[in-house]
Image (spheres, rainbow, N blue to C red):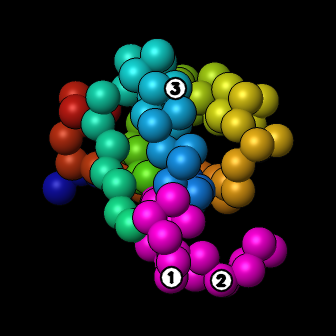
Amino acid sequence: MKLYDVKLLTITCEILAQENIIEILKKHEITGYTTYEVDGNGARGLRGQGLKNEKNVKVEVILREEKLQDVVEEISRTLFANFAIVLYVSDVGVLRPEKF
């Protein structure tokens, strides 16, 4: 079994930023992603326990390294100032690289 190296971009953000994140992904021709509602505690306190617009989401995207830098740069440049966002990148291996 051969694994192919790609990147996993994980973005945890307030739910109000989710639509903006997805629009940025679409702009960069990334159509595959997974979202989850999550809760937790951080710099802005306990999140995800109250009203719908106070919830957090996690967006996971597997993508090729060539697209990663532009996506991360646009998210940080356009959204970091206005939304609570934690973003990190991991190396992962996939079996079907043509999907990404």
Is residue 15 or residue 98 the one in the foreground?
Answer: 15
Mark 2 residue type = Leu
Q: Determine whether label 2 and label 1 are within 8 Å by CB.
A: yes
Mark 2 and mark 3 residues within 8 Å of each other at the beta carbon: no
Residue 16 in the image, given as x and y percentages of width and height: 54, 48
Residue 57 belongs to magenta span: yes
Along the horizontal axis of the image, is 86 left or right of 66?
A: right
Identify the amino acid type marked 3. Ile
The residue identified by callout 3 is 24
Tag 1: amino acid = Gln
What is the x, y in percent for residue 96?
A: 19, 41
Dot 2: element: strand
Mark 1 or mark 3: whose residue is earlier in sequence: 3
Work out how far the residue at label 2 is from the one at label 1, CA to CA, in angstroms.
7 Å
In whole angstroms, how far apart are the C-alphas of marks 1 and 3?
Answer: 27 Å
Q: Which label sits on residue 49?
A: 1
Magenta residues, start to end: 38-58
- Residue 92 inside the magenta-drawn segment: no
**Which label is found at residue 46?**
2
In this picture, is 88 found above or below 78? below
Real-space Cα separation, disc 2 to disc 3, in angstroms = 27 Å
